[in-house]
Image: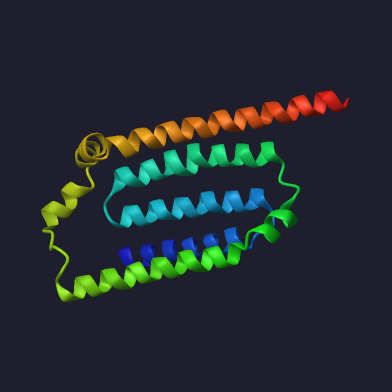
Amino acid sequence: METFFFVFVATFAIGTALAMVLSKNTVNSALFLIMHMLSVSGFYLTLNAQFLAVIQILVYAGAIMVLFLFVIMVLNMDEDEQIVTRVNFKQIFALVITLVVFAQLLYIAGDYSGILPDLSQQEMIAVGTVEAIGDELFTTFLLPFEATAILLTAAVVGAMLLAQKNVNVEDEEE
């Protein structure tokens, strides 16, 4: 049953990722990205990390994607052709995929050679608990956590300023 679920989630993840990249409409791409994030939460479920799966849905598929959709709607991306001609997304996407595959190959080589530490079943279960995640988040990774909060707040303020600027320009033209 776990294998079937994994294959289903993997197929769904690949399909939504391809649909996101190949879609010409930015809003549809953002919606496909939301569905892809839901499939990532399915991967977390296969790893027995239920807390991360729920957080993936609430934070990324919920809050952050609402912010992305808000920015897309505010900026009214009519200049798609100009953006595509300035930045070659295919080359950037190919570079990212190459780096991901290379990292996976390094991980496989490290696992095969015995360089990576072996975790017992009890240690693997303890890694995904709310207590372990909270302990790491608020001790080891407190500075990046706070920096992310400040960055997201700045993004919301910037989106609001851009929206206000566009409204003021339209009022002056009338």
Which quadrant holds the N terminus? bottom left
In the rendered structure, the answer to whether residue 52 lies left or right of residue 77 reads: left
In the rendered structure, the answer to whether residue 102 lies left or right of residue 67 reads: left
Which of the 4 image quadrants contains residue 16? bottom right
94 up-or-down from 120: above or below: below
Q: Residue at x 24, y 34 (%)?
A: 138
In the rendered structure, the answer to whether residue 51 lies left or right of residue 157 reads: left
148 up-or-down from 97: above or below: above
Q: How is the image coloured?
A: rainbow
Residue 121, x across and y down, in percent: 13, 57
Q: Using the image as rendered, state which of residue 136 and residue 13 is in the foreground.
A: 136
Is residue 1 at all visible to an observer of this figure? Answer: no
32 up-or-down from 64: above or below: below
Q: Residue at x 88, y 25 (%)?
A: 174
Residue 69, x across and y down, in percent: 60, 41
Q: How many numbered discs sit on the rendered protein?
A: 0
Residue 118, x across and y down, in percent: 12, 63
Is residue 10 at all visible to an observer of this figure? Answer: yes
Q: Given the current orientation, which residue lies at the most extreme right position?
A: 174
Residue 148, x across and y down, in percent: 40, 37
Q: Residue at x 50, y 31 (%)?
A: 154
In the rendered structure, the answer to whether residue 20 lies left or right of residue 1 reads: right
